[in-house]
Image (cartoon, helix red, strand yellow):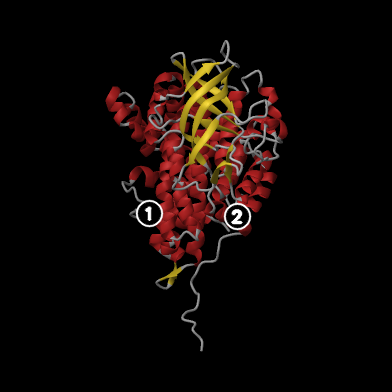
Amino acid sequence: MGWTTHEVTNQVPELGDYNLYSSDIALQEGVRREGGQSREDALLHYGERLGKTETFAMAHEANRHRPELESYDRQGHRVDRVRFHPAWHRFLRMAFLEGMHASAWSAPGKGAHVARAAIYLMHGQLEAGSLCPVTMTSAAIPVLKQEPWFDTLAPLLYSTRYDERDLPLADKTSMMVGMGMTEKQGGSDLRSNTTRAVPLGTGGRGMPYRLTGHKWFFSSPTSDAHLVLAGHDEVFSCFYVPRWLDDGSRNSVHIQRLKNKMGNASNASAEVEFQDATGVLVGEAGRGIATLVEMASYTRLDCVLGSAALLRQGLVQALHHARYRVAFGRLLNEQPLMQSVLMDLSLESEAATILALRLARAFDDTDNDPLELAYRRLLTPAAKFWICKRTIAALGECMEVWGGNGYIEDAPMARLYREAPVNSIWEGSGNVMCLDVLRGLKRHPELAVVLLDSLESDCADEPVLKQRVASLLSLLTLAGPDQEAAARYIAQELVLLVQASLLRRHAPLALADAFIHSRFQLAGRVYGALPAPLALRTVLERSWPV
């Protein structure tokens, strides 16, 4: 007797076997416009590799099997190893081959950061956990390049041969660098740190110190070295702390436990203790916070890229689902209200992509152009605040397009949603970013003038934008606590005005008009809460022309 109770119908086929680069018009246009077109062949190849069904499955496995800490070997020796699923290493091997960890520094020039950003925007759509080690390694290089002993590390840092083996550097083909800043009692308040460094001799730049203390979040704990903040002589300095010492012994950096994180599951984050660990002072003594903030300016750009990547993949998954799923007798993408939601999400994704690539171009600038410096110093923290926040809400909407199926861990939407908050928190939460924007405006008035003048010029012929620029300038005249209380609004307006200006200049007119109307003239904060359709078909066809 047959016991079949149903047929499988109206279920959406898995998304896979598509090219992440050739299917993303905004990404292609941005790469060409911002100077990364020399890498287009490589981007097309990587987009095809990432889009394979087997790569999606590999990402699922990397996140289903969390890293495991092995504190001691079977003989009782302290080893502090972290075991990762093989899929994790495969993604890092792919990232290294593409140069995500070093290409902007090993092959600098026009478009180097832009090309890397494009690779990052695609890789992050598949597996976000493997972005952390390459981000910190890349951000550490410009700090380490200023040290006279950098040449001893350069071949390993620039190598594209990923080496997961836990060995002294002399035996490895490449290396990764992590970062250790925050402590349990302080978080973003770095001046409350208690880790201390004592010189092993005369002390000073390039000299060894002994570190005692802890770090509450130690990212990529099995990296071959970390840049660590520690206090000495009533100041804070940055120290290069290797995993293995020159004599082949392990440094005394002991992993206490791995963090049980809500998302970012494939990647290990740890609590560690320094028990007279050896570190070398990097940069000028007493400028440790400034040195690590310089490193953070690059990691913040990667937070923007990582969130834009998650947003893009969530949108693509939602658009794909809506093309196949039938509800109440019609495909979802033929229903006007669903079109409003998808269109609004498409606007958010394109605006995030266009700004992310423009910021990457600013990091390529070597001429100290004032506007490029303003984008790097003032707009990057604002963009990290806004794009990371908007991505969290957007992925909730993308999940809802799938309905109950989106809430199930077997599908990709739940993982994308759980991944999103980390970019908003890591390297400075929203409030820290917004206060940093105000601090930058105050400390660099010449850059503030350049950025605000460019906004006034770009928006002069659009009444709605012109009025919002005037309102922003008025807010910047507030004093003390009043301006601080408005910091989130100021950062939001900066980002929205720049996004609107970029879209007006580079995107189809209908898309730019829809963005301006929905972001500046409508009060709703929920995606799709629009009183009338705005260029629906044009926007949706551009977002996913597959």
Q: Residue at x 50, y 78 (%)?
A: 7
Dot 2 falls on a residue whose secondary structure is helix
Quarter holding residue 187: top left
In the rendering, at what x and y percent does residue 199 appear? 54, 15
1 vs 2, front mark: 2
In the rendering, at what x and y percent does residue 484 appear? 31, 28
> Gap between marks 1 and 2, in whole Å?
33 Å
Q: Which dot marks residue 58?
A: 2
Dot 1 falls on a residue whose secondary structure is loop
- The mark nearer the N terminus, 1 or 2, is 2
Judge by depth and name the residue closer to the eye, 127 or 464.
127
Q: Where is mark 1, residue-wise?
A: 528
Judge by depth and name the residue closer to the eye, 384 or 89.
89
User: Quarter of the image containing the C terminus?
Assistant: bottom right
461 is higher (above) or lower (below) than 260: above
Q: Amino acid at mark 2?
A: Met
Whether residue 144 is visible, yes or no, is: yes
Whether residue 539 is visible, yes or no, is: no
Label 2 Cα neighbours within 10 Å, binned few <14 / some 14-19 / many ≥20:
some
Q: Amino acid at mark 1?
A: Gly
